[in-house]
Image: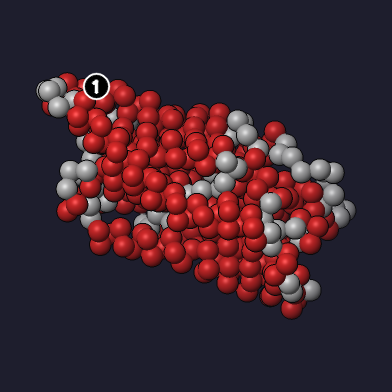
Amino acid sequence: MLSLPIILTIVIVVLAVCFDLINGFHDCANAIATSVSTRVLTLRQAVIMSAFFNLLGAFISEKVAETIGNGLVDPKSVTQYVIIAALIAAIIWDLVTWLYGIPSSSSHALIGGLLGSAIVYSFSFKVVYWQNFFDKVVLWLFLSPIIGFIAGFTIMHLLNFILRNQKPAFVTKFFSKAQIVSAALMAFNHGSNDAQKSMGIIAMALLSGGFINTFYVPLWVKISCATAMALGTTFGGKKIIKTVGHNMAKLAPVNGFAAETGAAAVIFTATMLNSPVSTTHIISTSIMGVAASKRLSAVKWSLAKDIVLAWVLTIPICFLIGAAVMYLFLLIS
């Protein structure tokens, strides 16, 4: 008969894979949205490419996974029930925002749920490493959208200057090819940051259950999380692709290249600083920056307002959901 820690670990792995599938609805879709919307790649081609480069990106570092699994809350002060509550909170929020086609942050949903459940379980705010939370999460919550906007705006202006004497037909043909490269970079950097978050959660569960002695991410965890994200894109990515790639601004291949290149650079920088950022925030504001380089009215600001509202609400709402789920666990235990 299976012991309780083994059963709980299995539940956590299943929930984490489900979270990655739903994360694929959101975040993997962001990585390929502009390439699909500009018709440089078909959805099938983009998904295959995204899966491959997400998998590669997931292997370049474990630092973001360590931040999630070992750097936000005291792993000795949480149980597997805390992790289950955090995953449930993130999944609920992701499903709600996906239903309405709003590209919210799966990363911040998971972080909010983890903080809320950990605090309720321990009955103490000291369980949270607040310095890490503010330095690696809150700071980048505000900085990454701004930097993403500036990156998209700047790269598009630079390309307009370089290509000012080129014929539109040449520009379209060249960047139809170049955007495949930028989409691959976006997917690779997405894997290097986003795929690590659920890896960190599973590793935390393995450590909490006594299955590993020190924090690290096993190979099977990396492969399963990256694969689940790619499958999620296939099943549900169209809603977010439509919002990010079509509804936010009208994009040509050169615009998609600028947005993806700017976003990939920002995500790479955050990964190197061990910060779990939202690819949703970054690619969305990079697209806004690209569109604004033409004229401010090119951005559909009413849609942008709804997206920003979801960004602001994600951590506090998931904090409350995670806290409520954990409280229910405590009541029935």
Amino acid type at circle 1 is Phe
Near-viewer residue (311 or 14): 311
Residue at horizontal 25 percent and vertical 32 percent from the top: 158
Q: Is residue 141 above or below residue 215?
A: below
Q: Does 226 sit left or right of 208 as displayed? A: left
In which quadrant of the rendered view does residue 215 lie?
Answer: top right
- The kind of secondary structure element at disc 1 is helix
Residue marked by disc 1: 174
Measured as percent of width and height from the top left, residue 216 is found at 74, 40
Label tally: 1
In the picture, the quarter occupied by the C terminus is bottom right
Q: Does 269 sit left or right of 67 as displayed? A: left
Q: How was this image coloured? A: secondary structure
Q: Is residue 314 above or below residue 271?
A: below
Measured as percent of width and height from the top left, residue 185 is found at 44, 30
For residue 51, say whether it is visible. Answer: no
Measured as percent of width and height from the top left, residue 257 is found at 31, 32
Residue at horizontal 74 percent and vertical 78 percent from the top: 331
Q: Does 314 sit left or right of 182 as displayed? A: right
Q: Residues within 10 Å of mark 1 (few under 14, many from 20)?
A: few
Residue at horizontal 43 percent and vertical 60 percent from the top: 311
Residue at horizontal 14 percent and vertical 27 percent from the top: 164
Near-viewer residue (226 or 109): 109
Measured as percent of width and height from the top left, residue 8 is found at 76, 56
